[in-house]
Image (cartoon, rainbow, N blue to C red):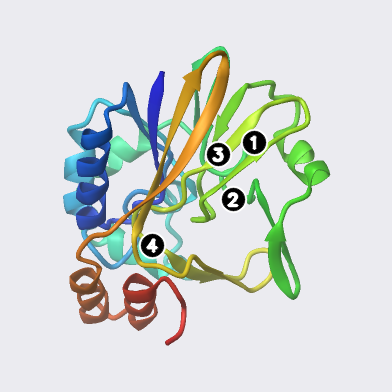
């Protein structure tokens, strides 16, 4: 079985189309979308319209939850922009997306961790830095879940970790945004250092799961220009460079 893992599209439809062209070239059995699909100053409605036509398994991430329960006083600007352009039918579609899915008895799909759409699975944020989570932290976040393959997103950081009991945990990175800043639970930056779109292919071969973390170039400068036009110079830098500052 070959599965293409997509996550954190964030309304970047040109990046999504580039990834799907690469997926088609490589050949897969399934495409899954791990959530955070629309929020951002780009193409939320157009991305929703496209995704609603697909037969993939698609999850709700934290931004789907935030869109559906938007707080006008302190809601994220990325959600505010998306919400201003989404139709009621698009919001109804978001409301029907599950937070996690078992593809079969050994493959679990989630956005953050199996139990939270907001906690980082494979990274730990400390007051001064973000670092790779250690095995004890990963085990605590995994809980009692006994899957052979766990696919997650949320952090935008492409990474694969093998646990001592043989479970492979894969984050494909972000299709649509290669750098951002956040303040939960402490202020921190995520910077992948390249504007290219990210996704992964996981494959079961001879009883074991393998992961390939892939990068795909696309017309990032045009999308960065749009972010700037829509009032987000921080997104403009991130989309153009994969960093949060020049």
Residue at image mark 1:
115
Residue at image mark 4:
177
- Going from the N terminus, do you reach mark 1 or mark 3 first? 1
Please give the name of the residue rendered at 63% of the width and 21% of the height, measured from the top-left corner. Answer: 147
Give the image quarter of residue 146.
top right
Residue at image mark 2:
118
In space, the residues marked 2 and 4 are separated at their CA atoms by 17 Å
In space, the residues marked 3 and 4 are separated at their CA atoms by 18 Å
Residue at image mark 3:
170
- Going from the N terminus, do you reach mark 4 or mark 1 first? 1
Please give the name of the residue rendered at 45% of the width and 53% of the height, measured from the top-left corner. Answer: 66
Q: Secondary structure at mark 2?
A: loop
- 167 or 36, which is in the foreground? 167
Q: Quadrant of the C terminus?
A: bottom left
Q: Are marks 2 and 4 in contact (CB under 8 Å)?
A: no
Q: Image height check: is 103 above or below 3? A: above
In space, the residues marked 2 and 1 are separated at their CA atoms by 9 Å
């Amino acid at each position: 079985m070959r599965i293409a893992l997509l996550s954190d599209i964030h309304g970047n439809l040109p990046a999504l189309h580039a990834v799907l062209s690469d997926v088609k070239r490589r050949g897969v059995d399934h495409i899954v979308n791990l959530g955070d699909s629309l929020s951002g100053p780009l193409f939320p409605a157009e991305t929703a319209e496209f995704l609603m036509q697909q037969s993939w398994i698609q999850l709700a991430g934290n931004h789907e939850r935030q869109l559906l329960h938007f707080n006008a006083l302190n809601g994220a600007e990325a959600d505010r922009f998306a919400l201003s352009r989404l139709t009621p039918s698009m919001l109804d579609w978001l409301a029907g997306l599950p937070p996690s899915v078992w593809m079969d008895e050994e493959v679990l799909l989630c956005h953050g961790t199996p139990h939270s759409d907001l906690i980082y699975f494979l990274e730990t944020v400390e007051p001064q830095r973000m670092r790779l989570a250690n095995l004890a932290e990963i085990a605590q976040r995994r809980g009692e879940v006994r899957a052979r393959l766990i696919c997650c997103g949320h952090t935008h950081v492409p990474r694969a970790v093998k646990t001592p009991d043989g479970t492979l945990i894969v984050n494909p990175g972000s299709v649509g945004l290669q750098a951002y800043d956040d303040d939960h639970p402490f202020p921190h930056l995520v910077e992948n250092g390249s504007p290219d779109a990210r996704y992964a292919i996981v494959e079961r071969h001879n009883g074991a799961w393998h992961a390939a973390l892939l990068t795909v170039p696309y017309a990032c400068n045009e999308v960065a220009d749009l972010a700037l036009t829509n009032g987000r110079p921080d997104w403009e830098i991130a989309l153009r460079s994969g960093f949060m500052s020049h």
